[in-house]
Image (tube, rainbow, N blue to C red):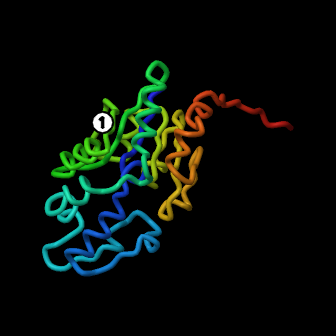
Amino acid sequence: MRIGINIDGVLRNLLEKLSRTYEKYFEKEVSLDDIEDYDLEKYFEFEGEDNLDKLLYEDCSLEIFGYSNEIEDKVVLKLNNFVRENLDKNEVVLLTRECGRAIPSTLFFLSKTGCMVKEIKFVTSYEEMWEHCDILVTTFPKAIETKPKNKKCIKINRLYNKNINSDYSLENTIDLFEEEYIEKIINTKTVKHKELK
């Protein structure tokens, strides 16, 4: 079984670092409690030639993508333990939708947190994530909404995805690894039912 894990929102606290970096350089605040959907341009406003993509992928890539904190303390350590314990049963692939300078910055983040996942895919769309896994662990609404019928999705609940339905959902990432959650999903069989007349 191939388990895809999104880096942002699941392992890396990108929004917190983006918010602090935006405040540092533009002297404007964006509260994470206000981000109710993942259309970030609604919340991060720019003037002139500045824009969100320029901030993320050109000007502050290392600061935002590389120096972000883990979403929860020791979540990458828990992921490493999961990978080590499941080498013979499951493959884990990290998935992220990034470009430009965000790519080496993400590799720096994974390095500084000691991530031992061998396969990392940088994709261009949320739909492409599904080409690399059977189960996707994500927070992104568009990734959840584009799920093929023959695959499973585990949503880590965030304010911006609360109205999106998923096969499974959790309040935090650590539970994914500590409570053998993935094994239960893998071993759950889907049974077709027949309508009674």
- 8 relative to 183, above or below: below
- 102 relative to 1, above or below: below
Q: Number of callouts in the render?
A: 1
Residue 22 pos. (x, y %): 26, 72
- 180 relative to 143, above or below: above
The residue drawn where x is 44% and y is 74% is: 34
Crowding near pointer 1: few (<14 within 10 Å), some, many (20+)? some
- 164 relative to 55, above or below: above
Location of the C terminus by quadrant is: top right
> In the image shown, does 103 or 194 lie closer to the viewer?
103
Q: Amino acid type of disc 1?
A: Ile
Residue 162 pos. (x, y %): 55, 61
Which quadrant holds residue 113?
top left
> In the image shown, does 130 or 61 lie closer to the viewer?
61
The residue drawn where x is 43% and y is 27% is: 84
Left or right? Give the position of 110 relative to 152: left
SS of the residue under disc 1: strand
Residue 132 pos. (x, y %): 38, 33
Q: Which residue does the numbered mark 1 point to in the structure image?
A: 120
Residue 46 pos. (x, y %): 22, 77
Left or right? Give the position of 191 relative to 18: right
Left or right? Give the position of 51 relative to 148: left
Find the residue positioned furthest to the top. Answer: 88
